[in-house]
Image: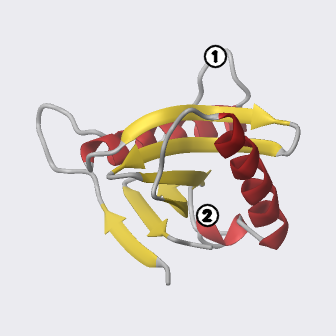
Amino acid sequence: MATTRKTTPPASSTGSSAPQRAPDREPHLAPHLALGAWGERVAGRRYVRDGYRVLARNWRCPAGEIDLIVFRDGLVVFCEVKTRRSTAFGMPAEAVDGRRQSRLRAAASTWLRSAEVRSDGVRFDVVSVLPGRVERIEGAF
């Protein structure tokens, strides 16, 4: 069963772990890639804040790419991060369809065979990132 965790950036005058706005652009990346990279950084910081250790970012193999692989208490979590500027076309997590889930499972299987990490189990999460809002769906599929 999927568990949804909604979090918002903490209010702080000294800064927060996630900016309220997505960056307008990063000069070395196309705007959509810069937005995605920003969302992956935000999601990674949230996992670390919640006690997870990041094992890999943007891990690639012939089966596909995994945005984040994190670990806590014997559990390996494979995370797909979806970032949008608005909900005009729906929530970001809605973009993780059955085809994408299959690719993530195949990539995770490849990673597990090659990794030197002992785990008690695995979980697949989806993190939706919008400016000022982060939602993590634990055990999304």
Q: Secondary structure at mark 1?
A: loop
Front residue of 4/12: it is 4
The residues tagged by marks 1 and 2 sit, at their Cα atoms, a distance apart of 24 Å
Which residue has dot 2 on it?
92
Which residue has dot 1 on it?
27
Residue 110, horizontal then vertical, whole percent: 76, 44
Front residue of 9/3: it is 3
In the rendered image, the residue lying farthest to the left is 13
Residue 17, compared with residue 80, is above or below; it is: above
- Amino acid type of the residue tagged 2 in the rendering: Pro
**Residue at point 29%, 59% (across, down):** 8
**Residue at point 81%, 56% (across, down):** 103
Front residue of 79/71: it is 71
Residue 1, compared with residue 119, is above or below; it is: below
Residue count near mark 2 (Cα–Cα under 10 Å), binned few <14, some 14–19, many ≥20? many
Front residue of 94/103: it is 103
- Amino acid type of the residue tagged 1 in the rendering: Pro
Looking at the rendering, which quadrant does residue 64 occupy? top right
Residue 81, horizontal then vertical, whole percent: 58, 51
Q: Secondary structure at mark 2?
A: helix
**Residue at point 85%, 45% (across, down):** 63
Q: Earlier in the sequence, mark 1 or mark 2?
A: 1
Residue 130, horizontal then vertical, whole percent: 49, 56
Describe residue 96's horizontal placement relative to residue 50 as left or right: right
Residue 40, horizontal then vertical, whole percent: 53, 40
